Amino acid sequence: MRRLPVIFLLLVLIVSCNKTPDYVISEDKMARLMADLYIGDAVVESEHRTYANDSLRKVLQQSIYAKHGVTQELVDTSLYWYGHNIQAYMDMCTKTEEILQKRIEEAERAGGKAESAPRQMSLDGDSVDIWSGIKMRRNTANIPSDFISFNVSSDKNWDRGDRYTLSVKGVNTHNAVTLNMAVDYNDGTTEYRWYNGPADGMSRLLLVLDSAKVASTVYGAIHYAASPGEISYLDSISLVRTRGRNDNVRARDGQMVVRNR
């Protein structure tokens, strides 16, 4: 009976040694974070035109950090610790691989099996969200870029007179948000529309394509600049395409048209 306290103490010490320090992200949480970062890297590689500059790639990375409630400093500190604790690092990598494999299997069961790397798709349907960028961004005064941009090229699922609705929801925002959308037509003209107003709550911008023309590209950007000391979010970002109706001229009222040289 006297040996029980000693055995109990040894078990406590063993369990304690397996835990990460308070200033380090735990193995399970770190594995989930690394899995999302790997997926983010795959998106950047497959959507190199959308993420053509370091600022946009940094925005994607920061959005992943915000999703997991961590900072760059905490991630750097954790990676340094894992680098000096090889067994914990190997265990974390194994968990990351298991998470990625599970996601691949789930995607295949859902019909998403692909023979090549992930790529942007313009989905078919009368109403579909074709946004392929980040869904949420954490806003601070020192983020690399105040812009979230997008670019969608025509494919077999496009139709004349299609409507595109760009939406974003501000959370704890202090300033105005600007939404811009434009469409290039094969006749050399560009049609565009913009919105500027309070960011708090849901903001939407509708762009209606000319049913008498053939569109080649729809593109635009969301711009929000945070105030010093502000921590806010742009959430629920989407770009929904719906099929046109019979009021094409009236629906396009207010859109500006320019001819490209």
Image (cartoon, rainbow, N blue to C red):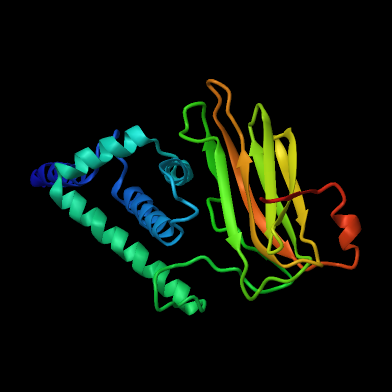
Q: Residue furthest front?
A: 261
Q: Nearer the viewer, residue 104 or 30?
A: 104
Whether residue 107 sits left or right of residue 132 in the image: it is left
Figure check: 107 above or below 187? below
Q: Residue furthest top?
A: 228
* Quadrant in the picture for residue 178: top right
- Residue drawn at x 62%, y 42% as measured from the top left: 222
- Residue drawn at x 19%, y 55% as measured from the top left: 90
The spot of residue 236 in percent (x, y) is 63, 49
Figure check: 172 above or below 167? above
The spot of residue 34 in percent (x, y) is 34, 52
The spot of residue 136 in percent (x, y) is 55, 46
How many badges with numbers are in the image? 0
Q: Residue furthest left?
A: 3
Q: Nearer the viewer, residue 232 or 226?
A: 226
Figure check: 108 above or below 27? below
* Quadrant in the picture for residue 13: top left
Whether residue 198 sits left or right of residue 100 in the image: it is right
* Quadrant in the picture for residue 83: top left
Q: Nearer the viewer, residue 99 or 65?
A: 65
- Residue drawn at x 70%, y 73% as measured from the top left: 125
Whether residue 187 sits left or right of residue 140 in the image: it is right
- Residue drawn at x 29%, y 33% as measured from the top left: 23
The spot of residue 21 in percent (x, y) is 25, 36
Figure check: 96 above or below 85? below
Whether residue 68 sits left or right of residue 238 in the image: it is left
